[in-house]
Image (spheres, rainbow, N blue to C red):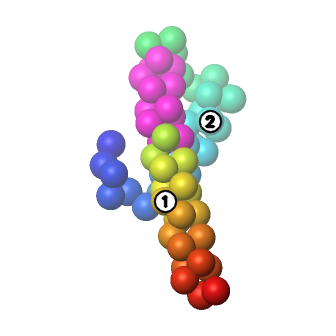
Amino acid sequence: MNNEIKYEEALAQLQEIVQKMESDEFNIDELAVQLKAAQRLIKLCKDKLSKTEKEVLKIQADGD
């Protein structure tokens, strides 16, 4: 999974995985793989949100 993926793309992929899980589209082997992919996507999204939050706080602090 590429760190250059945009937040919106990662979120869309995560939503697709969840939707397929909820509709039981994965067998047990696919489920394990998709859970790992979802875990990476969640981390990527959290990291991007955290980075953006820090940037916003810095901009706010610079404006004061």
Question: In percent of the image, x 57 and y 26: which residue is there?
Answer: 25
59 is higher (above) or lower (below) than 45: below
Q: Residue most toward the top?
A: 28
Give SS at disc 2: helix
| Foreground of the two, 31 or 49 | 49
Identify the image quadrant of residue 50: bottom right
**Separation of disc 2 and disc 1 at Cα?**
25 Å
Q: Quadrant of the N terminus?
A: top left
Counting other residues with Cα less than 10 Å from the Cα at mark 1, is it few (<14), some (14-19), or many (20 or more)? few
- Is 6 rendered above or below residue 41? below
Q: Which residue is mark 1?
A: 51
Give the residue number, with chain letter if any, for mark 2.
18
Q: Which residue lies at the image location 46% right of the left edge and 46% below the top edge?
A: 44
Give residue 58's position: percent from left, percent from top. Answer: 53, 73
Q: Whole-percent x and y of residue 33? A: 42, 23
Q: Which residues are magenta?
A: 30-42
Q: Can you give x and y, in whole percent of width and height, for residue 19 in the image?
A: 64, 38
Give the side of residue 51 with respect to residue 2, left or right: right
Observer-nearest residue: 14 or 28? 14
Query: Label 1 amino acid?
Result: Lys
Residue sitting at x 67%, y 29%: 23
All told, the count of numbered labels is 2
Residue lying at the far bottom in this picture: please name it: 63
- Which residue is at 51% across, 70% downward? 55
User: Which element type, helix, strand or loop, lies under badge 1?
Assistant: helix
Q: Earlier in the sequence, mark 2 or mark 1?
A: 2
Residue 1 magenta-highlighted: no
| Left or right of residue 51: residue 20 | right
Amino acid type for the residue under numbered disc 2: Val
Is residue 7 among what the camera can see? no
Q: Nearer the viewer, mark 2 or mark 1?
A: 1
Residue 5 place in picture, x, y as percent: 38, 57
